[in-house]
Amino acid sequence: MAQVELVHVTKRFGKVTAVNDLNLKIEEGECFSMLGPSGCGKTTTLRMLAGFEDLDEGEVIVGDKIYSSRAKKIYIPPNKRNFAMVFQAFAVWPHMNVYENVAFPLKYRRLPKAEIKERVDKALLHTGLTKVKESYPNELSGGQQQRIALARAIALNPTLMLLDEPLSNLDPKLREEMRFEIKELQRKFNYTVIFVTHDQAEAMAISDRMMIMKEGVLQQVDTPMNIYNHPANKFVFGFVGLSNFIPVLVKDGGAVVESAPEAGVLTREIPAAFKESRATLACRPSEIQFVSAGEGGVRGVVKRRSFLGEVIDYRIMVGATEIRVQKLYRQGVLREGETCYLRFDRLHWYEA
Amino acid sequence: MRFPRLSGLKNFGLAELMLLVAIAILVVVVAFPILLIFWNAFTTPEGKFNLKDVITILEEPQTYKALWNSVVIAAGVTVLSTVLGVFFAWLVTRTDLPFKNLMKLLFVVPFMLPSFIGAIAWKILCSPRGGYLNVFLMHLFGLEKSPFNIYSMTGIIIVETMYLFPFVFIQVSGALERMDPTLEESALISGIDLFTITRKITFPLIKPSIVAGALLVAMYSLSHFGVPSVLGQSAGIYNIPTLIYEVIHASGGSFDAIRTGTVLASLLVVAATIILYLQNLVLKNGRYQIIAGKSMRPMLLKLRGLRVPMLILSILYIAVTVLLPTAIIFLVGALKTYGLPLKLANMTLDNLKYMFTWKMTRDSIKNSVLLSLGAALVTMLVGTMISYVIVKVKVRGKFILEFLGMLPYSVPGIVIALGVILAWSGRFGINLYNTAWIIFVAYIARYMAFALKSTSASLEQVHDSLEEASRACGATHWQALKDIVLPLIKPGMVSAFFMIFLPALRELTTSVLLYGPTTRTIGVAIYALHEDGETVYATALASIALVIICIGEIVIRKIGKTERGNA
């Protein structure tokens, strides 16, 4: 019954509003990511859920129970919440070995010895730490240390699992590996997981749904795919995936690049709101095609070509506007300085 | 950093030359005097090995009594300082005590007060005959006997603790502040209560800092001269340093007296070395990486109903240990005659004026200021050079320098003074005895450790690549040194200067053995005036010293702030 609900949650630090009137529902067994640039309020939101920060306004409800409410003067301290949290800096206790690290919280719940051992062993097994359970954290790698923190969380059998950028201190290869391990564990135990990250690829890979925040304000909540394909605004579009923003003018029923109207028309499907005005068109570098001269694309010149392995990354100049295009290596290669024609498959319209 | 070879010499370059100069300085200034102490202790005047006399001296009741007293005082001060230091450090870093930042500052203030001035103040307050506090309490409660007797082991332990406890406080509050708060938060979210977290997570993790601070207190207390000397003598309580002083002074420099002094000094050096060794052991074995990656506020224990009582307790502690003694120094320093009631009618500014007109006191102020400035400047510059060789220069034989650099840490001030007497009294062709230079040389030896610590720390932060980058841009060695390294370590050098200047200004232990008729320091002058029963003049001079120290501390804080602002 771990349905998490945040109702009109607001948190201020002095004059800064870290989280502004946040409303959110998270379903049981869901893996939910909070994504945004640093300082957007995602970590503060997580810490309010954990109980490390009190709220200035609003309520935090988990299940049927109110955990924090300024108006009703309710605040349950972190140690009474039965949540688990994994931190960016691992936060494993250096003076205890792996087994003790996982067992320590259970001992203070006065559980029977046999049950403690069973739960710790199970947690160590699922995190692949059984072999090193006698080791001390400073003898282990960063990935193993983060596994200790995960094992500790699993052994607690928490109502809610909170992860605060748990992968940011790991190297890229390990990060990808751990992503899947966390996802596996979440599926296996059906935890409700709330995951904070500033890495959009990580959020998209791991979450059932995610939210994007900016300066304390919620921008969009949806599945990763919907957010990628239907971003609610320009900020979300830019934050999730690679993006081009092209300033355009609408002239004679067609959108043309503002700095080079003569180069050709991007599209003739103009939404009603943008008739005869300026706008910003957004598109993904992968959703632009090169076409031949006669097919009516927008004319540009290849300014720079970078070979990234499977794909080639082009910077195309259309007038003074730079447009990024990514094509598979096998789809042919253009030279720098060559003239090319662009066709835009999917365009999003935003205010100029 | 590689240095060019000097032409003509195959294996001898600039680096080797710098190393040799650095070693030579440390040997002459530090190692040689200390070696002389051991040499003198264990040989006869004819230069034969002599253990019998050492044993005789050790078997004398006054020696082992003093040793016992030293150990008891050090143990008491260490335990008391640790309890107080850890408690107050925890209070200001981990609870919601009001005015925490101010309190944190105030708890370090006892550090700035010279402890022998504090001892004089407590003597005035709590001497069994006519101490102001005793008289006041006797009147208040109609007591027949004085409630406090400061002339006792307990008195010495309590007064020393007041001025040494900041060692523990600074170490522990620093560790608590730098500790990664998520180590505690992760325990909290796992369902463990704050009390258990404090016991099972926080304290085990800061234990190395606690032990390090405690051992530092033990080392200082063991070799501490001022407080036992002021409070112990009339009750016949001696510790090793005061016994050394007594023996040397009473004998007028006879060989036997000097040897007794050197045997006692050897004991101190051995004890200090053991303590330093223990400290290294603790720090090496127990050093966990508990430093936070990103700075976040730790969870604070809500004191609730105890919030105000704890604040009152802290303020009271500071009032009693800092304000009361300081006030009594200023008040008594203004009295027309010692013993008069502390009323405005009995006060005058003439005493203060007299301090500047009386040649003895005026000279002592001048001597202290000049000696401290000179010693601070020279020690800082020499220390920077030696640190540079230790940290940056790639040369074989550096370990000798590292060892010699560590040496002054374990040598108490009174031992340095004794060694300097042995080395610079004409036995080796140079006689500095009874001149200011002998104090100057002793200060350099005594404070070299401070200079090395501060400058090598800032040199370590200057990454080699910065110097190499400037070399790659075409700078010569000296240009790289002048334009890159020196500006970057300037803050470290400035702080080294003040770390020497301020303690040297209020120093007593070393100069009390070395002063001559015209080379008294402020510390010696206050001490001598007090010994002669001139309590009013002693406190008047002490007030002036306190004002100078206070100004010095404010200046160093101002400089520290602007330096950090520029960095």
Image (cartoon, coloured by chain):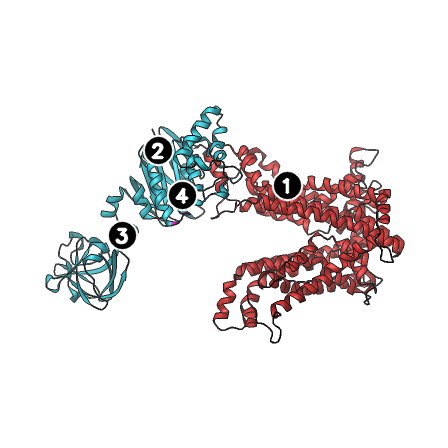
Chain colours: A cyan, B red
- Please name the residue that numbered disc 3 is placed on: A234
* 4 or 2: tag closer to the N-terminus: 4
User: Which residue sits at x=49%, y=36%?
Assistant: A134
Q: Nearer the viewer, mark 2 or mark 3?
A: 2
- Mark linked to residue B314: 1
- Please name the residue that numbered disc 2 is placed on: A191
| C-alpha span from label 2 to label 3 | 33 Å
Say yes or no: labels 2 and 3 on the same chain: yes
- Mark linked to residue A319: none
Give the quarter of the image for residue B379.
bottom right
- Please name the residue that numbered disc 4 is placed on: A166
Q: Nearer the viewer, mark 4 or mark 3?
A: 4
Q: Amino acid at mark 4?
A: Pro
Residue A107 drawn at (x, y percent): 50, 28
Query: Considering the numbered disc 3 on the image, is that residue within a helix, a strand or a loop?
Result: helix
- Compared with A77, B552 (above or below) is below
Say yes or no: labels 1 and 3 on the same chain: no
| C-alpha span from label 4 to label 2 | 16 Å
Q: Chain of mark 3?
A: A
Give the quarter of the image for residue A267.
bottom left
Q: Mark 3, residues whose alpha carbon is within 10 Å: few (<14), some, or many (≥20)?
A: some
Contact between marks 4 and 2 (CB within 8 A): the answer is no
Range shown magenta? A167-171
Q: Amino acid at mark 3?
A: Lys
Q: Chain of mark 2?
A: A
**With B191 as the anchor, is A242 left or right in this view?**
left
Q: Chain of mark 4?
A: A
Asked if the magenta segment contains residue B200, the reply would be: no
Residue A111 appears anywhere in the view: no
Q: Amino acid at mark 1?
A: Ser
Nearest the eye: B437 or B397: B397
Q: Farthest residue to the front: give it.
A: B10
